[in-house]
Amino acid sequence: MKVLVVGGGGREHALAWAIARSPLLTGLVVAPGNPGIARHGRCAPVRDTAVEELVALAAAERPELVVVGPEAPLALGLGDRLRARGLPVFGPSAAAARLESSKAFAKDLMARHGIPTAHFRVFDAPAPARAYCRKLGAPLVVKADGLAAGKGAIVCRTLEEADRAVARCLEERAFGEAGLRLVVEEFMAGEEASFFALSDGAAVLPLVAAQDHKTVFDDDRGPNTGGMGAYSPAPVMDEEMTDRVITEIVRPTIAAMAKEGAPYSGVLFVGLMITRDGPRVVEFNCRFGDPECQAILPRLDEDLLPLLEAVARGRGLPAAIRWRAEASACVVMASGGYPGHYETGREISGLDPTGALPDVEGVQVFHAGTALRAGRLVTAGGRVLGVQALGHDIREAVVRAYAAAARIRFDGAHFRRDIGRRALARQEPR
Ligand code: AMP
Ligand code: GLY
């Protein structure tokens, strides 16, 4: 099978790595890809939001399956465009991707179908939004409706902070169009987890849970990032909690989307808060998490490609699959200054000419923001590499990932030193 993957970050490297292991694969093209991905397939220099060019690339390459990694092209309707040309696509339609691209849509859907989430209301004018903030009381959360690169949710500890957040969205237009509508919601206390499930629009195949580390510094301090590391499994998601998430959230959401005429096909990423009263939805995403994907896919004890194809073709999705017993951890190495201003073009040392770490078993180095310049591997983004390792438990996986990260160097490199801390805090000290 010939496959086209859209995207060029760490998540797409993990997808390309897993797809390239399939005996069914006959050719792999990735747009735009990156130097790490080039180890597994051919990179085509097309941006992941250039819908017209991607449609033209697909017409020229004639893949038998297109796998879309990021949310932006899905929200722009890339899946619809390719399906209209008869191509099987892994990734939802633009209408179904509204689960991520419009928080107001996602919240209203949950309210209509009794799916547990924070109490909320949607506003497009400041005065009623501020009045509702007073009704809820602090702490509360103000969220831009549209896609805001993970920065659109403002947790407000006081009503003054809430007033500022409302003004930033609606009056100062800090999030542009994405913030002209906002969701004001109740603050939920608990532990966060990410859960993933595949669906072909009707059938559901639950995958596994992971936890990521959103803030840039240890102990959850500093500004939010795209994610500084992840591990899987997530101990907070024990068997009972997983069953509850599947029956109370995942299946009802897939059923609701089908019932409302926008069947959801692809991977559903449920951002969860595990509260005292059970699991509740923080947000939905219409794609794999980044870096959760890098932690999860190495645990898969199956060929990924037939699963992606079954989702895309809308038939043949199995009810359950096998996972390795090992735990997995991924440590993100970032450029100095990220998530604020950072410089690129810093030479990366420690990796072999293909961008892999030599002589290390059970470790993968996924490229996120790298480039080749005059034959040398250099930094080209905020998140540069995801160093992933398996271990018999989270502790061993984390130790292995850090040992591998210590062998890789670039000027200004920084990474969190406490990946897995929630999981480790639950384990008995050894
Ligand atoms: P979101 O963009 O909706 O995923 O929100 C980003 C982050 O804000 C989440 O990962 C949570 O840490 C936090 N957050 C969002 N909504 C809530 C809520 N209702 N209660 C508590 N924390 C929240
Ligand atoms: N790591 C969180 C996300 O992909 O949105």
Image (cartoon, helix red, strand yellow):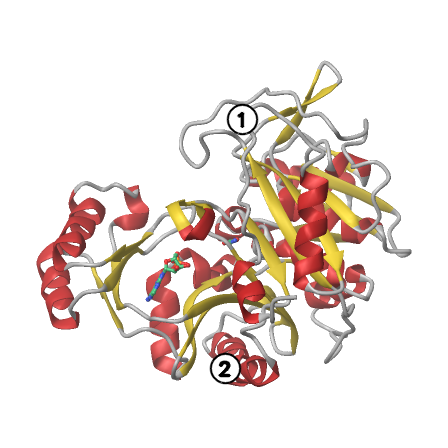
**Residue at image location 16% in from the left, 58% down from the top:** 158
Q: Amino acid at mark 2?
A: Pro
**Among numbered discs 1 and 2, the one appearing first in the sequence:** 2
Which residue, given by chain and number where applicable, does mark 1 sit on? 412
Which residue in the structure is indicated by mark 2?
Answer: 252
**Residue 317 placement (x, y as % from top left):** 73, 74
**Which label sits in the foreground, 1 or 2?**
1
Q: Quadrant of the C terminus?
A: bottom right
Query: What residue is rendered at 50% in x and 82% in y?
Result: 252
Q: Is mark 1 within 8 Å of ligand 2?
A: no
- Mark 1 vs mark 2, CA separation in Å: 46 Å
Residue 185 drawn at (x, y percent): 26, 67
Determine whether, in the image, residue 299 is placed left or right of residue 109. right
- Say which residue appears at 69% left-offset and 63% top-offset: 312
Question: Residue 270's x, y, as percent?
Answer: 50, 67
Q: Secondary structure at mark 2?
A: helix
Residue 124 falls left or right of residue 308 = left
User: Considering only vertical position in the picture, is 149 above or below 126?
Assistant: above
**Relative depth, front residue between 158 and 404:** 404
Secondary-structure class at tag 1? loop
> Of residues 29 and 17, which is closer to you in this image?
17
